[in-house]
Structure formats: structure tokens, C-alpha cells
Image: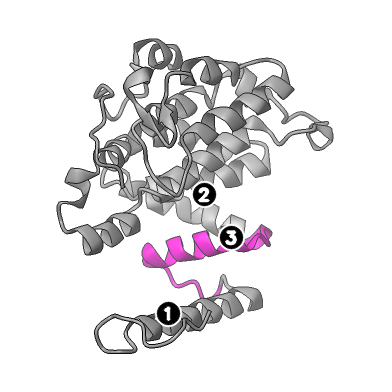
Amino acid sequence: MTNSRSRIGNPRTHELPHYQALLDDTDWALLATPCGTGESLPTVLARILSPDPVVRSAATDEALGEVTHQNTIYEATVPVALYVAAILHHPAIAAGGLGHDADMAPHRPTLVRLLEWLSATAYDANDECVAIGERHYGKEFLDEYGEMRAFRDLRPAIFSAVRPLLGHDNAEVRDAAFLAAIPLAEDPVLTAHQAELVGHARRLLATSTDRYNRDRVLHAMTEWGHDTSDLENADDIAARERYARLNAERDSWWTADGTGGCSEDPPF
């Protein structure tokens, strides 16, 4: 958790600013990153829109890497997230790497990578993370962690860019958009959209074998109040039982001496 408060502006949370306005109007040099400030970010972010896929891929790595560290939301993370959402439908992003020869490309489609980063960032600021923070730091957690609060306030705007991609022709894009939509839809303004996401959840569970994706979706379905017993396969059940066992062992380890301390080495 960082201690400084965000110095970015406060755009209307349901509207997504134009990407160029974000580059021009954000005081990047004042925004904290894991290793300094975001002074170099405008130049790097602009290169993500390059027509050259190699330049685009390298810029994506550099820009997102500058604000990604230990599941933390930094001051610069917030305008970067807005910028990423704002360029999702830019022609250079929408078409790049998604043609008939996409499998031959040296890099994964930028659109998918940007959606995956938005998803990971949204999970780092989801309700579960807030609950954990409040257990450790008290109910004032979000008041002290202004960067996370700022990102959470912008979830409706980011969702507005992600939602149209749920119907994308490319299955990889559809899945990435859906996985980003799940944590974004926790926002009170967006919970009504959870019902429409159920169909996407069932489709992904019927087609995907990716363990990470299936775990995310099954967890979301449970949180939304749906019985997932008819959606689980043998691997899902085995994974769920394994997670439950590890959680029980962890809880037992932490409470072994009755005070939350450790009486022996952890069992894993």
C-alpha cells in the first residue's frame, strides 16, 4: 500500500477521456511508479499505437511494466488504466495481430494483452482485496489508499470500453474481455450487468481448459449466487478440493498456538 494520495484529475467516472487528452493533460512527472515517477510514460504509451507490431509489443511491455509491481495500485496506474481502456478500440489495437495469420505473429495480440492487464489490475483492486486491507489496516484502508479508491471509482468508465468486446469475433479477445469484466462488474453501478455475464461464463466453461480462467469464472459464478455443480468437471472439483485443503492447512498453521503465531514450520 502506498502512502501518497493521487495527483491526477478527477474525470467524470462514467465517461472515458480521449486517449490523447490523457497523454497531454496528465502531469505524469508527479505520479509515483514502483521505481520513481511516470515522466517517461506519455512517450511510451503513445508508441503502443504504432502500426509496427514489434514497436507496439515492446511499448506495451515497457509501459505496463512501469506500473506493475507486487499487485499494487500506484498513482500512475490510474491514468495508465484509463489510457489502456481508451485505446482498446483504436484501429491499431483493434486489428493488430488478429488477422488470419495471427498465430504466425511473433507477439500476442496487443488487444488481448491490454485486456489481461486491465483484468489483473481490476482484481488487484477488487472487493476481496479491500476486505483483506481492512482486516489488516482498519476500515480507513481505502481512505489511506487513494490510488486504489481512484481506480475503483473509474470501473464504470473502464467497463464501458471492455463491454463491447464481449461479442468480438475472436474467441481469445472475448475471453480476455470477459475476465476483465468480472472484477469491474463488482462496482455498485455495474452489478446489474452480472446477469448478462452469466452466459459468457457458461460459454467459457464449456470451451476452456485453462485452469486460471476456469477458477476465476467458477468463483465469480458462486459469488453471483449460481450453482456451479453442473458446470464443474473432474479437474475443477479436484482443484477446488486442493485449494480448500491448502487454505485449511494455512489457517491451522497461523492459529496453531492459539494466538495467530506460528508453532512450527508451515506445511507448504
Magenta-colored span: 205-230
Q: Looking at the image, can residue 55 be seen? A: yes
Image side of residue 141 versus residue 207, left or right: left
Q: Are marks 2 and 1 in contact (CB under 8 Å)?
A: no
Camera-nearest residue between 203 and 126: 126
Instruction: Residue at 55%, 42% (x, y): give it.
Output: 116
SS of the residue at dot 2?
A: helix
Instruction: Residue at 35%, 51% (x, y): give it.
Output: 126
The residue beneath circle 2 is 179
> In this picture, is 234 found above or below 126?
below
Instruction: Give the foreground label among 1 and 3.
Output: 1
The first of marks 2 and 3 along the sequence is 2
Instruction: Give the foreground label among 2 and 3.
Output: 3
**Amino acid type at image mark 2:** Leu
The first of marks 2 and 1 along the sequence is 2
Percent of width and height locating residue 184: 39, 45
The first of marks 1 and 3 along the sequence is 3
**Amino acid type at image mark 3:** Tyr
Q: Which mark is residue 212?
A: 3
Percent of width and height locating residue 121: 44, 43
Image side of residue 106 versus residue 61, left or right: right
Camera-nearest residue between 169 and 19: 19
At label 3, counting other C-alpha atoms closer than 10 Å, the crowd grade (few under 14, some 14-19, many 20 or more) is few
The residue beneath circle 1 is 250
Instruction: Give the foreground label among 2 and 1.
Output: 1
SS of the residue at dot 1?
A: helix
**Amino acid type at image mark 1:** Arg
Q: Looking at the image, can residue 166 be seen? A: no
Q: CA distance from mark 2 to mark 1?
A: 28 Å
Percent of width and height locating residue 78: 36, 32
* Residue 207 colored in magenta in the image: yes
